[in-house]
Image (cartoon, rainbow, N blue to C red):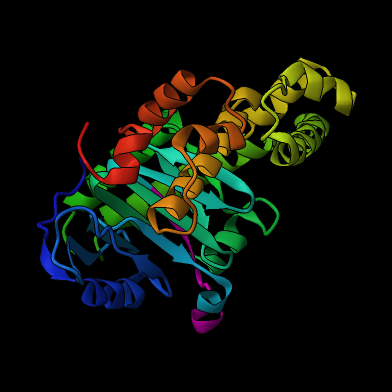
Amino acid sequence: MLANIRASTLPVEKFTTDLQRICGGFEVRAANDRGQTPGQMRGSIGLQTGAGIEMAHVAADVQQVTRARHNIRSDNGENYFLILQEEGRALMSQNEVSCLLRPGDMVLIDSAAPSEFTFFGDYNRQLSLHLPRAEMHARFGHGLVQGGISLPRHDPTTLALCAVLGKVLGQPAAGSIANSYLREAMFGLIGAMLHERSGREDHAGIDSDLGGARALAAGQAYLDSHYRNPELSIQDMADDLGMSLRQLQRGFAGISSTPTKYLLVRRLEHARRALDDRRSGRRGDLISSLAYEAGFSDLSYFQRCFRKAFGMTPKSYLTGEAD
């Protein structure tokens, strides 16, 4: 835990205004099923500068935070956000990529592209580093930097970034020599992460990276179109795409995932959205029907996966009651 900010009860509108002031145009969907007075929430948001980098501390018990195209038009999207999940779980979606963030996981978000965060559990905390778009492109090039890149908490680069962040947060006000070194260390690690994810560390790896990128793009497109088929297998996908399982696995390794994990995330995301629709009264299907619609053929397996991913059963997510 790098920071522990004190949360209080405040109007959702106040939190939304502060979030927009500090992070840009975002919309907040309150979690009205957690015992709060309507229009109220528990949370806090603050801005800190360390090593010349703005960092937003965000704590909230809201259900969802989204950034749509009309939000982007209102503030131009001048930053990339490197987000560290410190407490709770969040499902992030951007650029056709979805990943589940647990405490210690990180993700790079492009403020110039639509994004969505859905939060699970009673309370979530995130630390968001605001990395200027112009500087990121000047340092690493336009093609290398993209939103939706995730860093698992056990990845060596993630651990190193957290260690540097810990020192940044413990330093006095900006201006010291130590802060300039820490800033360069931070961007150096971010650059190493980008090169590692792209495979561009040397010319010999470029052809391999292009092949992996093509396999990833084809695999994601295939799964996005076929994930609701309960009989789909990864071998079927490989056969249909004319690839080997090894090619697909190397492609998905570029986003720290596997075809099987990506397929599961897509199905869970679909089921979660369907449960949201039922909770809001837009549909009345049984949980089992929603699971089958999302591509699950085994209800008990769906329930286990949902609970493991989101920390609650589908029924609890639907009713807002503890298991």
Give the extent of the magenta segment.
Answer: 73-83
Name above or below for residue 48 compared with residue 73. Answer: above
Residue 181 horizontal side relative to residue 262, left or right: left
Q: Residue at x 70, y 30 (%)?
A: 229
Comparing 297 with 311, the one in front is 297
- The single residue placed furthest to the bottom in the displayed view is 74
Residue 189 horizontal side relative to residue 258, left or right: left
Question: How far across and down, in percent of the image, does residue 167 sit?
Answer: 23, 45
Q: Residue at x 58, y 31 (%)?
A: 292
Name above or below for residue 227 compared with residue 235. Answer: below
Question: How far across and down, in percent of the image, does residue 132 sit?
Answer: 48, 66
Question: How far across and down, in percent of the image, does residue 318 sit?
Answer: 34, 44
Total count of labels: 0
Residue 188 seen in render? no
The reply to whether the magenta stretch includes residue 78 is yes
Quadrant of the image containing the N terminus? top left
Residue 313, picture quadrant: top left
Q: Residue at x 50, y 76 (%)?
A: 71
Residue 228 seen in render? yes
Quadrant of the image containing the C terminus? top left
Name above or below for residue 226 compared with residue 112. Answer: above
Residue 78 horizontal side relative to residue 54, left or right: right
Comparing 118 with 193, the one in front is 118
The reply to whether the magenta stretch includes residue 124 is no
